[in-house]
């Protein structure tokens, strides 16, 4: 059985399904991309897919781990978060504003001793989000 050897630091991004604030996300994510981190998300609309789109635009590596909603129902998100924490072992969870799913990602990260960091968000002058 082969094992995946991951040499880059993994940045786990989580946030709400309605959070798509591209200017803020670019500003917060850019230092991690420049430092060679690999992005990992739950591949859900909102903050996850917005982060993936930004990351791809910078031609940086990323991994999307979608929840299996059809098979697991409401437990799919927490199960996916556990898979990310246990299997991929990210170095940091950077979370944007969100709800229950984001809170679960934070709880999962903390229980797996993954550092968590809240992305402070502000409205930029003239920004329409």
Image (spheres, rainbow, N blue to C red):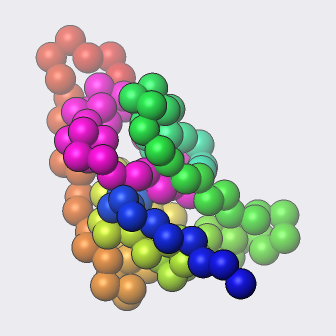
Q: Which residues are magenta?
A: 14-42
Please identify the quadrant where the C terminus is shown: top left
Q: In this view of the protein, can residue 13 be seen by the observer?
A: no
x%, y% of residue 30? 25, 36
User: Which residue is most to the right?
Assistant: 71
- Point 48% across, 56% down: residue: 40
x%, y% of residue 87? 54, 78
Question: Which residue is more in the foreground, 1 or 58?
Answer: 1
Question: Which residue is more in the foreground, 114 or 123?
Answer: 114
Per the image, is 73 magenta? no
Q: In this view of the protein, can residue 74 be seen by the observer?
A: yes
Residue 46 relative to residue 103: left or right: right
Relative height, residue 113 to residue 59 (above, below): below
x%, y% of residue 41? 50, 55
x%, y% of residue 22? 36, 28
Q: Quadrant of residue 108?
A: bottom left
Per the image, is 39 magenta? yes
- Point 78% across, 74% down: residue: 72
Residue 44 relative to residue 86: left or right: right
- Point 39% across, 69% down: residue: 90
């Amino acid at each position: 059985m082969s094992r995946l050897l991951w040499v880059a630091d993994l940045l786990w991004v989580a946030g709400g399904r309605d959070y798509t604030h591209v200017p803020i996300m670019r500003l917060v994510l850019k230092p991690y991309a420049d430092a060679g981190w690999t992005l990992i998300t739950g591949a859900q609309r909102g903050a996850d897919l917005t982060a993936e789109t930004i990351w791809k635009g910078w031609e940086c590596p990323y991994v999307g781990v979608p929840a299996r909603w059809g098979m697991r129902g409401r437990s799919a998100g927490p199960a996916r978060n556990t898979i990310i924490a246990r299997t991929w072992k990210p170095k940091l969870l950077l979370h944007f504003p969100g709800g229950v799913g984001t809170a679960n990602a934070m709880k999962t990260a903390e229980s797996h001793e993954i550092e968590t960091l809240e992305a402070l968000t502000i409205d930029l002058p003239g920004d329409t989000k």
